[in-house]
Amino acid sequence: MNVDNLFSLTLLSIKVDNWEEKKKNILDRSNDFEWVESINTNYDPYGGDLMDVQNIFANEIKQIEETVEKELKVSGSWVEKAEKGMYHRLHNHGQVGLSAICYMEFDNTEHKPVVFVSPWKDVFNGNIVLAESSEIKEGTILVFPSFLEHFTDPNQSDKVRTSLSFNLRSF
Ligand SMILES: [Fe+2]
């Protein structure tokens, strides 16, 4: 028997160097949070690279570019702060390009991470298939196709769960 895996979906994870310095830099820039739908965020659809990710994560973006063999530009970046009970409902980041999540303040013992929804259903029962990264920790950037649907469950901890997100486009 020959087995062809016709489609696959890749998740990259990159450990950020000089994490504490970059974390401070990004958190210092993140302000003007507004409650939008179910979470506090400074997301602005016309704001561009608000968090200056293109510069701060230049080394990490270079690694991504080398891996996907494309030149990439940060088209938007923002921070989300999930206080107790806050969550981010099911969404995607558009139909083209890559997107990234980096947890800035994340306690593995109290916080639950982003959950990804497979574009493909379970072949035998048609159920929705969910997946989490095994690489969730502060200071690790996860990169996934922008079209991939994802969500977060409500934060059940008294500690704030803070994440940075950004979109990478190849123009
Ligand atoms: Fe997202």
Image: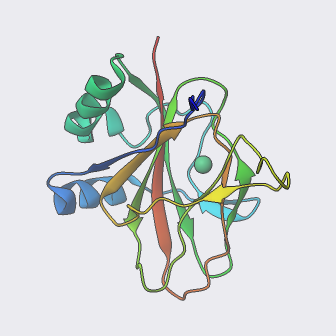
Residue furthest left as drawn: 18
Establish if 72 lies above or below 115: above
Along the viewing direction, whichever of 39 and 134 lies nearer the viewer: 134
State the residue in front, 14 or 160. Answer: 14
Residue 125, position as x, y percentages in the image: 85, 56
Vertical placement of 86 versus 20: above or below? below
| Residue that extends furthest to the front in the rendered view of this protein | 1
At a point 54% along the width and 37% down the height, the residue shown is: 9
In the visual, does 41 lie left or right of 166? Answer: right
User: How far from the left and from the top, in percent, is residue 73?
Assistant: 40, 22
Query: Could you say where residue 48 lies in the image, as x and y percent from the top left?
Result: 50, 30
Quadrant in the picture for the N terminus: top right
- Identify the residue shown where x is 24% and y is 29%: 62
* Residue 39 horizontal side relative to residue 27, left or right: right
Identity of the residue drawn at 62% across and 85% down: 156
Residue at the bottom extreme of this rendering: 158
Place residue 83 in its image quadrant: bottom right
Give percent across and percent down for residue 103.
41, 61
